[in-house]
Image (cartoon, helix red, strand yellow):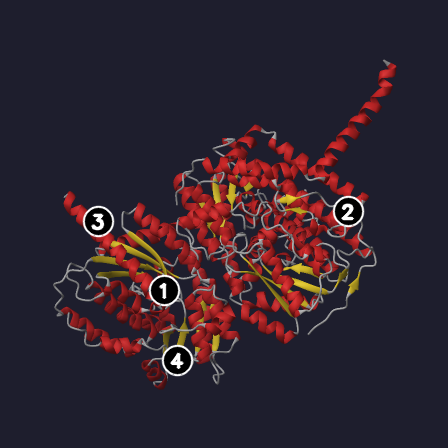
Amino acid sequence: MRDLEHLIYFENLLQEANNALIAQAKSDGKLCVAYTCENVPEPLLNLGDCCSIRLFAPHTGSMDIATYYMTNLLCEPSRALLERAIEGGFNFADCVITPDGCTMMNRCVENMELLHTMGQGNPNFFHEYMEIAFKNTDSDVDLAVLQCTNHVLKPLHEKYGVDISDASIRESVERHNKICRLIRAIGEFRKGDRPRITGYEFHVLCLATYVCPKYLILDKLEETLEELQNREPDDKPWRARLLVVGSEMDDSGMIKLIEEQGALVCCDRFCFGSFPGRNEIVLNDDEDALRQVCRHYIQSCQCPRMMSMDKVYGRKQYVADLAREYGADGIIYQQVKFCDPWAYERTLGSSMLNVDFGYPVLSVDRPYNIASSSGQMRTRVQAFVESIEIKKIQKGEQA
Amino acid sequence: MFKKLLKLPLYLLLAAVCFFVVTFTIYMFNLDMKATAMLAPLLEKWYDHQEHNQYI
Amino acid sequence: MKTVEKVINPVRRAGEQSPGKIYDEKLKVRARREWRGLKDTLYDYTRWLYLISVLARFIVVPRNIKGFFRYRWMMSYLFVPHGMDKFTVGLRDEALRIAHTSFNFVIADVTQAIANCFRGDRRVGNDVYYSDHCVITDENSMVTFMMGFDKEKIHTILREVPTMFASNIFHQFNVMHYLDVAQQYGIPGDVCPMPEAEAGISIEDDFCVLGKCAVQNNTTCDGSLMGNGIIAKRLERQYGIPTFQLATPLRHKEPDVMDYAATEIKKAIAFVEEHTGGKWDWDVYFAAAKRVNDATRCRIAQLEINSTPYPQFFGAAFSLYNDTNYMGNSGRDPNFVPIDHKLLALAEQGYRAKRMYAKEYRHRAIVWGVQPQYTIDMLYWLVQCWGVMPLADMLSIINTEMIAEEDTPENREQAYRDMAMLNMEMIMRNHTHGGYKVLLDELWELCEKMNADMVMMWEHMSCKALTGMHGMFEEQARERGIHIMWVSHDLCDPRVFTRQAIRDQVNNYMRTVMREEPLDPSLEIIPDNEAY
């Protein structure tokens, strides 16, 4: 296929956490609200002049200093973020809001706070930690509303005078939805026999919506969607269509590695991905917007820390539904090394998706930066793709 | 009969002394745990041979 | 660096002076028991007889024999006397009596728990009526939500306690098989081995199957929360036992989580009532609340004694007794009350007599972090080998607040908040979760309060909440002039760190950093790596 016009532009934005658009947003007088977890309702971090920036650490190499502070047994993303913070890579942030979602990420941000890695020269800088819901019930929504009020809205208002009114939230949701609609529409082109976008290209675009000020990439996303509508797909078929599920994926290199083996990543179900992160938030006029936003995040949440059994079973059903909708031949359950929640979720998920839903599943752990150890992963993906091909051939013979 | 009854405390004492000597010997020389340690490998084999419905 | 005054024991220990030399490597148990002088040896002997009688009374029941041969973890039952000897090495006088009083009670309690499991177990006793009045809950679970149910009518079964928690204490290799099973099914080896072993037991189908319903919670860590999903799936789908997930907020020091936590307690109670037909009884609850407060007062008094130059109740005995009483009992069983008071009386008596556990106390240490299950006795070794007195351990630093104990309309509402508070501030998680202040700041405050010059940091390598603050512990200890001694382990997998490898970390620190010689060189290396 012909290259997407803006692909290099987006790729370049992902080379650094403190990218050119963040600098531009700062010069536009925007507040950079840094966050680390998909369980924080994104629209609340984009109220008024705020823009949410999800922290990531591209091209992570050595994590020696962070390893001293957190040992080598904590997950690599948490250490990579701390290392980058110590290096001064997140100095653009005006505050950090993090949920006590998984222990390791929470400890990462606590170390950032104790080491005073951010906020020098900004007397209004703050760290906030939130309790987040465990289940999908009304009292969990109540909890989320209270937590968002106390740990997101109040501090933003008190420290920076941000408008936290219902109208402001609704406006932010609408801006958020615009991005979601675009990403979802772009992602639709992964469907069918002749997809017009690769999983890698999609991931680059989707990732950019998390780590860049959204208002500065809107036009490029719109142009990309238009371009895709007329893009001529390749004739050469993909060897297999794969759905990738698991830990946060802020390294497009992993998707690239999979696609280099001839498999298309036809759908994504991980943090920093589009499912469920780019689901549109539908608001009604009867209820306050904050409560509706919180309910949306709780109901759509696919994070393994949601502990009730409806969520435990629901997560697997969700993956199976996506696999069916996007025509996946197989599923890769991946877990970033030393991640506890996904260690268990991967085990149970890879078993259930195979036994209960009949999908071939590859269950792997991976480094944060796949470039640091790509050989093993390449071999495993190759073998998986081949096994799917063999199954297809065998099915064909039987038919 | 009366003589026999008189001897009862003596028998009881004797039994208590025997009980003490035997159990204290077991206790002091850790014979209970030594026997258990010898039994353990056999039990492990027993458990290893049992069939289990492994399932996740 | 901070220093404390050395305390010399003027009294020579009765009986044997070098208890480290009595292991038989070949047999994997001790060659003989310790000679403690006539009086204490006879006392120890009578307690051994009592223990044997407890175990014998258990095993004569036919269904218990059946259970014994069905479940691999029952191997640990055989090694209870061996385990008890570990907890009393070198102890004399009140210390010996405290260890026996607390442990014998705990052992009897756990033995009863196993008997209860077997009674209701569909594969063993299959007492359907009994099973229908049982509620299963996790091993690391506060049972506050059961405080208002009559324990004779609705039974709480912590089925993971004998299966995993206690099993590993008495037989160090006993959970390795379950870890292997879990890893064979894809759970990585870097997660906490405790929930991993529990998941392995479930996968292996080696839990007793009983109960009308189950209540799980997230009280310890991410691993524990996630392992529950695997266990609940089997309970629900294979055995038809409905499960309720009791969500317990992590940021327990924040007032804005209390309503949620209290609501969850209400829901858990409603779930139990719905499934078992049991009825919550406020009289039963407030009677239990009184006992909780009584236990709290006793615990505070014990810690006060430990802040003096003559600590009495510490180490594994203190920690495991608290575990059982605070967490597994939560005031439900009145039999704990006299034991609490007996232990306190013994400690006070020992304090008045200035009893010491070693030849001298060179350092006063706070023990922080999570102890290894299979070397849980190591704090007695620490004081006897190196003269480092462990004043308190993190797992015993729990709630000090009194809860409402009078039955009034206001207190009934307050009761839910009290239960929620106890639940949130459960053992371990009250420090490992809730923000860095409860882990870091509270440690330094405790050092100050108990006049400690040293921190022994158990670094449970898979406990991410603790290791995630490694650097901060080092830096802040340095700033405060506190010696910090790191002792790594992997909780219940002796293949990662053997017992001697754990002790060697202390040996190396004391020799190279503190430049000291052991008080009892016979203890420095003990050939117990292969011992049960």
Crowding near the residue tagged with mark 4, few <14, some 14–19, many ≥20 C-alpha atoms within 10 Å: many
- Nearest to the eye among marks 3 and 2: give it: 2
Instruction: Please name the amino acid that badge 2 sits on.
Output: Arg
Asked if marks 2 and 4 touch (Cβ < 8 Å), the reply is no
For marks 4 and 3, give the CA distance.
52 Å
User: What number is the disc on residue A126?
Assistant: none
Determine whether the residue tagged by mark 2 lies in a helix, strand or loop. loop
- Do the residues indicated by labels 4 and 3 lie within the same chain of the protein? yes
* Residue B1 on image: x %, y %: 85, 13
Up-down relation of residue B37 to residue A156 (above or below) = above
Q: Nearer the viewer, residue A56 or C190?
A: C190
Determine whether the residue tagged by mark 4 lies in a helix, strand or loop. strand
Crowding near the residue tagged with mark 3, few <14, some 14–19, many ≥20 C-alpha atoms within 10 Å: some
Residue tagged 2: C36
- Nearest to the eye among marks 1 and 4: give it: 1
For marks 1 and 4, give the CA distance.
25 Å
Residue at the (18%, 73%) spot, across then down = A3
Residue tagged 1: A248
Residue C407: tell me if it is visible. no
Residue tagged 3: A391
* Residue A322 on image: x %, y %: 26, 56
Instruction: Please name the amino acid that badge 4 sits on.
Output: Leu
Residue tagged 4: A31
For marks 3 and 2, give the CA distance.
71 Å
Instruction: Please name the amino acid that badge 1 sits on.
Output: Glu
Of all chains, the one bearing label 3 is A
- Nearest to the eye among marks 4 and 3: give it: 3
Asked if marks 3 and 1 touch (Cβ < 8 Å), the reply is no
Q: Quadrant of the C terminus of chain C?
A: top right
Q: Nearer the viewer, residue B1 or C430?
A: B1
